[in-house]
């Protein structure tokens, strides 16, 4: 959901942009001989990454990362390569080790290990996948073919949704924005094949070309499905027409960040009035949710667009669209030719990758997506010692103390609002490493030799698990990321920060390194997540996680003015060609980066105290703090990836996650002795927290 913040754009989230079960790449022949042993642990402060020929006051990112950038080209199966990827890749190898062992079909395996082992084995069994061909999706296609009128659509769509097909809309449960102690039913926009609604309407040459290539990709996929080239080409145009009509009423990613724009609680009767052409009763009969009489129709305009499509009564077009979304979702478990074709568009064209990711990497990823808390149990037992959890929690408390001091000393905020802000801060819950209670997968049947069946059953399991939440007290102990994930998030509806075990390792956190580096890396990440509670979105939710104003009018106006400085700053950064960062889309993340570095620095000073500080490896503790920070973001990316991120991701390009931040921080300029007219000193500096 759009209301959860992710620190990083590199790992899962980017894969999920393609929706449903679809992933980027297919089998790589080159990678068949990939080593099974994990790459070595990654260093957290890397002298060899630094480019000493660059003045840190001129371009700090290039100074801290220049040599790393030169020496770490993008591997052919990736579209970007940075420190996050290095750690993600290492975790993938560790998970592969677990899965190789558990897929050996040992009768003595625990029930949890049977599931992850057999899921992975089925996914890796390409011989069976090839021999089954299209048979696994036949029942879905037959039910689509059997549609006689739009009135038959709801039960068919229900079956597709349960199996993970991203057609038309999404249905599930989420906390009620205005009473977040309880979950309510929610229907959200969905059903698009491009990363954002604006992709359907932009008329620059690159956007027009991308849409043409999508149409070609859809046509080729239909041909692989068995259609004649002429019919496939016509069908692809039909799909594009329906998706464009759906996009018409959809919100773009910037608008989706505004909670008021995605919260429209209404009765089921009102829902029916907005979408008279869709028989919700039949849909509910098919999915069998608990009884409810109101829900959040997140984007009413989207529902109206969908209704218009159904009211036109062009059943053949709707069927064609459903076939496409089904093929797209099932791709990971279809024969290789489908995955090659999927890679050509989503991997090569959209992201600029040169090569398909090897099968094992994709199967590790799918296992983590579908059985994350089963795979995570073994991962945590083997690779996340209790000391790491205790030390991280200690740092979180140090960062919270710094943010408390920061808020207390703000000159622009009135005592009245400060009291509310401090109350909210004191009630942020800290979740570290992994859930206290693991998800129970016992009712999910995982079978060797049935890759698509496993995937469908895992989707049904998750769909039903979500449905059961409707009307129930919201469970804040649940996690939105699996333990091996290299990422972190703040959830405004729960007012908590979440740090999966996967990120609590070098280069983010290193037990063996000095405090300065750890505070610059994981300390800043913790500060970043805490600050999300107080960014343009998080600040609209109160300490209980409810969408409720706690600001005086004057303070809110002041806040908006200070935020506007960030919007203008980041709007000015050019990422590739003429593509600028979107200041509004990235505002929450930029606020969190800028606030995070300040409070991490304050916390470090508290820890260092008045002790004399000797340089290590030629750098003072404060210099090591900023270099440690910058080096977490060292990255290479394809121009396609840079463009995609700028257009559709809430996170700024890594270069500006460093330079855009340090140039606002006087303590940075002091640490490196920058002259007043240095490029890394912004005038006037932007600051909120
Ligand atoms: Zn973030």
Image (cartoon, rainbow, N blue to C red):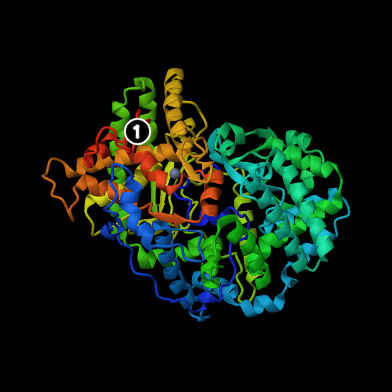
- In which quarter of the view is residue 451 placed? bottom right
- Residue at disc 1, secondary structure: loop
- Residue 533 in picture, x, y percent from top left: 43, 37
Q: Quadrant of residue 316?
A: bottom right
The quarter in which the N terminus is drawn is top right
Given residues 67 and 132, the one toward you in this image is 67
Q: Quadrant of the C terminus?
A: top left
Kindly give the residue lying farthest to the top in the view shown. 554
Residue 456 in picture, x, y percent from top left:
66, 63
Left/right of residue 79 with respect to residue 133 in the rendered view: left
Q: Which residue is mark 1?
A: 682
Q: Is residue 260 above or below residue 183?
A: above
Residue for point 60% across, 76% down: 448
| Between 562 and 365, the one nearer to me in the picture | 562
Question: What residue is drawn where x is 41% and y is 36%?
Answer: 591
Q: Find out if the beta carbon at label 1 lies less than 8 Å from the nearest ligand 1 atom.
A: no
Q: Quadrant of ligand 1?
A: top left
Q: Is residue 555 left or right of residue 142?
A: left
- The number of discs equals 1
**Residue 633, how many percent across, how many down?**
38, 51
Does residue 495 appear in the picture of this structure?
A: no
Give the residue at the far right of this rendering: 148
Residue 330, image x, y percentages? 67, 64
Report whether residue 636 is seen: yes
Question: Quarter-wise, where is residue 339 in the image?
Answer: bottom right
Q: Hey, which residue is sitting farthest left in the picture?
A: 612
Q: Residue at x 46, y 77 (%)?
A: 101
């Amino acid at each position: 959901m759009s209301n959860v913040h992710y620190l990083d754009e590199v790992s899962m989230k980017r894969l999920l942009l393609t929706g449903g079960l679809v992933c980027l790449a297919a089998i790589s022949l080159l990678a068949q001989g990939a080593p099974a042993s994990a790459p070595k642990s990654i260093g957290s402060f890397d002298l060899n990454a630094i480019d000493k020929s660059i003045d840190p006051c001129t371009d700090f990112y290039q100074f801290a990362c220049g040599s790393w950038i030169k020496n770490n080209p993008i591997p052919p199966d990736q579209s970007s390569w940075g420190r996050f990827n290095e750690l993600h890749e290492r975790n993938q190898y560790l998970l592969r080790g677990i899965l190789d062992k558990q897929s050996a079909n040992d009768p003595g395996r625990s029930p949890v290990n049977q599931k992850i082992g057999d899921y992975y084995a089925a996914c890796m069994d390409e011989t069976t996948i090839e021999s089954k061909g299209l048979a696994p999706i036949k029942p879905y296609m037959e039910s689509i073919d059997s549609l006689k009128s739009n009135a038959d659509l709801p039960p068919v769509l229900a079956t597709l949704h349960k199996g993970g097909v991203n057609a038309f809309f999404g249905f599930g449960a989420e906390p009620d924005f205005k009473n977040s102690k309880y979950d309510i039913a929610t229907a959200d926009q969905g059903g698009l094949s491009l990363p954002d609604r604006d992709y359907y309407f932009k008329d620059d040459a690159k956007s027009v070309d991308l849409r043409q290539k999508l149409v070609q990709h859809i046509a080729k996929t239909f041909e692989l499905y068995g259609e004649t080239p002429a019919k496939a080409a016509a069908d692809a145009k039909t799909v594009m027409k329906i998706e464009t009509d759906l996009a018409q009423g959809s919100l773009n990613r910037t608008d989706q960040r505004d909670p008021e724009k995605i919260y429209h609680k209404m009765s089921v009767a009102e829902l029916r009035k907005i979408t008279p052409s869709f028989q919700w009763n039949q849909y509910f009969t098919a999915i069998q949710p608990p009884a409810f009489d109101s829900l959040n129709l997140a984007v009413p305009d989207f529902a109206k667009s969908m209704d218009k499509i159904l009211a036109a009564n062009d059943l053949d077009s709707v069927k064609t669209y459903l076939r496409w979304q089904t093929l797209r979702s099932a791709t990971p478990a279809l024969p290789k030719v489908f995955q090659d074709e999927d890679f050509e568009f989503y991997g090569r064209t959209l992201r600029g990758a040169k090569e398909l990711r090897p099968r094992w990497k994709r199967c590790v990823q799918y296992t983590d997506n579908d059985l994350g808390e089963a795979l995570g149990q073994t991962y945590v037992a083997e690779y996340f010692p209790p000391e790491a959890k205790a030390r991280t929690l200690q740092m979180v408390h140090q960062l919270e103390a710094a943010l408390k001091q920061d808020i207390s000393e703000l000159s622009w905020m009135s005592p009245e609002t400060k009291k509310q802000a401090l109350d909210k801060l004191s009630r942020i819950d800290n979740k570290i490493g992994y859930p206290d209670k693991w998800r129970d997968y016992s009712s999910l049947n995982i079978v060797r030799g049935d890759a698509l069946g496993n995937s469908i059953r895992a989707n049904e399991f998750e769909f039903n698990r979500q449905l059961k939440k409707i009307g129930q007290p919201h469970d804040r102990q649940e996690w939105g990321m699996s333990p091996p994930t290299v990422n972190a998030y703040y959830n405004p509806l729960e007012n908590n920060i979440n740090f999966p075990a996967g990120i609590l390792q070098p280069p983010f956190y290193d037990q063996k390194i000095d405090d300065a580096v750890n505070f610059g890396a994981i300390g800043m990440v913790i500060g970043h997540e805490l600050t999300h509670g107080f960014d343009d979105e998080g600040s609209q939710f109160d300490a209980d996680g409810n969408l409720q104003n706690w600001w005086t009018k004057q303070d809110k106006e002041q806040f908006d003015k200070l935020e506007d400085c960030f919007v203008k700053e980041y709007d000015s950064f050019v990422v590739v060609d003429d593509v600028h960062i979107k200041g509004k889309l990235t505002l929450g993340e930029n606020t969190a980066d800028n606030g995070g570095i300040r409070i991490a620095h304050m916390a470090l000073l508290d820890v260092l105290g008045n002790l004399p500080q000797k340089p290590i490896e030629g750098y003072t503790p404060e210099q090591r703090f900023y270099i440690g920070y910058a080096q977490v973001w060292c990255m290479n990316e394809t121009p396609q990836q840079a463009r995609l991120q700028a257009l559709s991701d809430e996170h700024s390009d890594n270069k500006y996650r460093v330079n855009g931040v340090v140039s606002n921080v006087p303590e940075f300029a002091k640490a490196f002795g920058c002259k007043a007219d240095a490029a890394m000193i912004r005038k006037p500096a932007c600051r909120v927290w």
